[in-house]
Amino acid sequence: MRLLIVGTLEGYITAAGKIALQKGAKVAHTDSIGGALNALRGGQGADLVMIDVKLDVGMLIEALKTERITVPVVACGVATDAQAAVKAIRAGAKEYIPLPPDAQLIAAVLEAVAEESHAIVSRDPSMGSVLRLADQIAPSDASVLITGESGTGKELMARYIHRKSRRANAVFVSVNCAAIPENLLESELFGHEKGAFTGAVARRVGKFEEANGGTLLLDEISEMDIRLQAKLLRAIQEREIDRVGGTQPVKVDIRVLATSNRLLEEEVRAGRFREDLFFRLNVVNLVLPPLRERPADIAILSQHFATKYSEANGLPERKVSPEAMAMLQAHRFRGNVRELENTMHRAVLLSRGTEIGTDAILLTGAEPAAAAQGYSAVAPVAARATAAAQPPAGEPGASGTAGLVGRSVADVERDLIIDTLSHCLGNRTHAANILGISIRTLRNKLKQYSDEGVAVPPPAGGELDRAAM
Ligand SMILES: Nc1ncnc2c1ncn2[C@@H]1O[C@H](COP(=O)(O)OP(=O)(O)OP(=O)(O)O)[C@@H](O)[C@H]1O
Ligand SMILES: [Mg+2]
């Protein structure tokens, strides 16, 4: 959670900032509305803006709207100034926080905002039972293994468990085991001491220590090297870790959650995953059903994403027409919720009126439902490329492979990979999932392209594979 405080808060900035920090927020400060806009334009990012009611709250909210920057704004002022509070709310502030700041109130506002952006939207009974189990086990400190196909919401579920746990006010730290090269993952997880290897110029604290007191998510754990699994097992069992090059073990108090989109039992059988580690992690297993088995979720999620992306793009709210809904219900959604989300994002941009019709729904793969709507039955790879790489382009489905004749496979593959990666805003994990290749294969290809002088989109903000590129 990133918090941006704007103004002096009548001298209470330090107090408010401290409370937010204790609740796990990253806090930044600027004195003016201009400063706030610059910070947000510059990609600094914020999940919540807290503004002094003495500043022109309405002006900030208007400016954010015109520049299509979506971030909730709450106003703060001395408790006695009722008029200013009313004015701020009228101007569009979500909340009014009286000063001096109250720890519980700030915690509640932070939690409400976090919950809004990571809410699990669901109505299908099959998800209902998974959520009930999650509610039951969340308060314990038990390790949880969250499994399910790609894009079913495993990471979202991990955040949900953290929010519902006794550690909710402490940090949630996530490590993507697939996105970090093998040789760097050990340092990433356990940290290293100064001089542990050439280049270790200072002590570095790893994710286990960073998550101390809170929750550590080991995302895509099946991708972890078997040698490192031994070290991980010890860390989870003993609740202590060894920094690389360290001589003293360090105690850690964490709860471990893990996700996998492979069947770990099979990985164990194939000798790629340690059985003892599997049993350690698998105290509770939450299995997220694929979206195609959650018809009621397709309905509620498609409207949820339509509303979300209308808002994010500063467009009037779009409703999903019954025909478009029928088309969505009939689709197989190999990419699950992520695929539906991308489909609805495109649909919002493609639809002209306030209703989303079938012409705005571009589905990937040659599904019968899509074909019936007049989309040509193209080869799956080309179809994926069309939908993934050129979302808002003119004529949907008019692709086929005819236009590719004359080009080499390597050439087309390179364009497909680079375009998919750009579409995923540089996120290696998502691009590899869409392309149906392993993250390692993707990384090797990208290295080759960049050695050949091809421009490769940089990794997304949250991904830690910078060093590998
Ligand atoms: N029930 C849901 N309600 C709202 N959004 C959802 C839901 N499930 C998934 N999403 C959204 O779908 C996208 C994919 O979810 P998430 O990253 O949690 O999936 P995942 O299973 O971890 O995927 P992967 O296996 O590719 O890592 C995210 O943008 C997430 O916000
Ligand atoms: Mg994930």
Image (cartoon, rainbow, N blue to C red):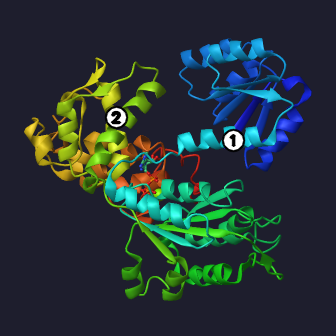
Q: Position of residue 315 (x, y in %)?
A: 42, 20
Q: Quadrant of the C terminus?
A: bottom right
Could you say whether the residue bearing mark 2 is in a helix, strand or loop? helix
Q: Position of residue 92 (x, y in %)?
A: 61, 18
- Name the residue that disc number 2 marks: 303
Mark 1 and mark 2 in contact? Answer it, CB < 8 Å. Answer: no
* Residue at the spot 82% in from the left edge and 38% down from the top edge: 17
Q: CA distance from mark 1 to mark 2?
A: 28 Å
Q: Is residue 413 left or right of residue 12?
A: left
Q: Position of residue 430 (x, y in %)?
A: 43, 52
Relative to 260, is 282 above or below? below
Could you say whether the residue bearing mark 1 is in a helix, strand or loop? helix
Q: Amino acid at mark 2?
A: Gln
Q: Is residue 7 left or right of residue 151?
A: right
Judge by depth and name the residue closer to the eye, 324 or 228. 324
- Near mark 2 (Cα within 10 A), the count class, few <14, some 14-19 or many ≥20, is many
Sequence-first tag of 1 and 2: 1
Judge by depth and name the residue closer to the eye, 188 or 53. 53
